Amino acid sequence: MPFSAARLEEILRVAERSPDEAANVAELTVIKTGSFANKAPEPREVVHVVVWNMERGRALDEWVGIDAIRRADLLILCEVDDGMARSGNVNVPEELAKRLGMHYAFAPNFFELTRGTRRERRATRALQNRVGLHGNAILSRWPLAELRRVPLPVKFDWFKDYERRIGTRVGLVANVELANGPMTVVSLHLEAFATPKERAEQMRALLRAIPDRPERAIIGGDFNTLGIRPTWLAGLKRCARQLRMKKRPIESSVGDEPLFDEVRRSGFSWDRANANVATWRFPRLVSAFEAKLDWAFVRGIEIVPASASVVPAIANGSRSSKRLSDHDGLCLTIACA
């Protein structure tokens, strides 16, 4: 646990009064890092990038069984756990980096006061969280330099939700030195329970924190581009609309989310870096409701034509069709020559 019992009591009192103040306590600003790369990568003409919301990061043996994960040079990850009972009480990004032989950085979004959702609590009834952190990560074949955690404006009070937690969505920013020069890499997770306008405010805060140099930059993550603030009524309306527009997930997202205007004004684009395919499905209840929530935005980067694709969250060769996450992975290839 990152807090002593006395400190936790103090922070809980702060959270009752001000979720913004509690979201930025010093204990949540620490970026965890590690290096398990045995040697520097050979110069290469392309860099394989994977963007994935891992939904906790359970079953790491199956995650490393996915070809795209094993081939990746850069992994831009959201919703990974550190010391949560639901994911085996391990530091998920650290364990994944060990298995893949990569450098890693992890920035907490939240300190979890419970073991997660109601379903997760039932499954871990006899266990406790060893640490209780949940956040974003970057894994890289190259060392990660100039690491920064960018806290985003609080747009939903998770402390008062049934899944009680303290913190806020963040962007994790790093620099990597490729064969043809430096590049900024960002792992970003925007608030699901926010309006499109509020997500645009969060995106604007992140963009202000990204330096103009190096010019080359990639922002990847789960931007929750549903075009609504989720409620049951809004969700049903969105589902009906999505069924009518099933073949057009990119077009249906861009017009409803002003964050794309913020991105474009900052010199980023998304055309070649994304496949026009949904990356998320509503779990269990409404299988027809799907959306493109996961994106890569690039600036000053050449994307290999037709390299963007979406990979299902199912281990290669798995005998089970059980999904590892409610999000599929976005893959793209950067030209470095």
Image: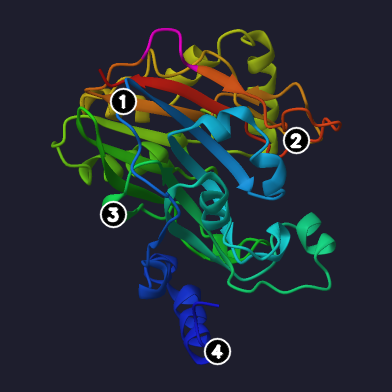
- Give residue 116's quadrant in the image: bottom right
**Nearer-N-terminus badge (3/2):** 3
Label whose residue precedes the other's in the sequence (4 or 3): 4
The residue drawn where x is 50% and y is 15% is 275
Q: Residue furthest bottom?
A: 6
The magenta span reads 304-308
Quadrant placement of the C terminus: top left
Question: What residue is pinned by disc 3?
Answer: 147
Q: Are marks 2 and 4 in contact (CB under 8 Å)?
A: no
Residue marked by disc 2: 323
What's the amino acid at mark 1?
A: Val
Q: Which is nearer the N-term, disc 2 or disc 4? A: 4
* Amino acid type of the residue that numbered disc 2 sits on in the rendered structure: Arg
Disc with the residue nearer the chain's start (2 vs 1): 1
Crowd around label 3: few <14 · some 14–19 · many ≥20 (10 Å): some
Amino acid type of disc 4? Ala
Residue 309 in the magenta stretch? The answer is no
User: Where is residue 322, by image quadrant?
Assistant: top right
Residue 306 falls inside the magenta stretch = yes
The residue under the point 66% across, 9% down is 244
Instruction: Check disc 4 and report its element: helix, strand or loop.
Output: helix
Quick one: label 3 or label 1, which is nearer the N terminus? 3
Residue carrying label 1: 298
Label 3 close to label 2 by CB (< 8 Å)? no
Q: Residues within 10 Å of mark 4 (few under 14, many from 20)?
A: few
Residue 300 screen position, x and y as percent: 21, 22
Report the residue that reaches farthest toward the left.
213
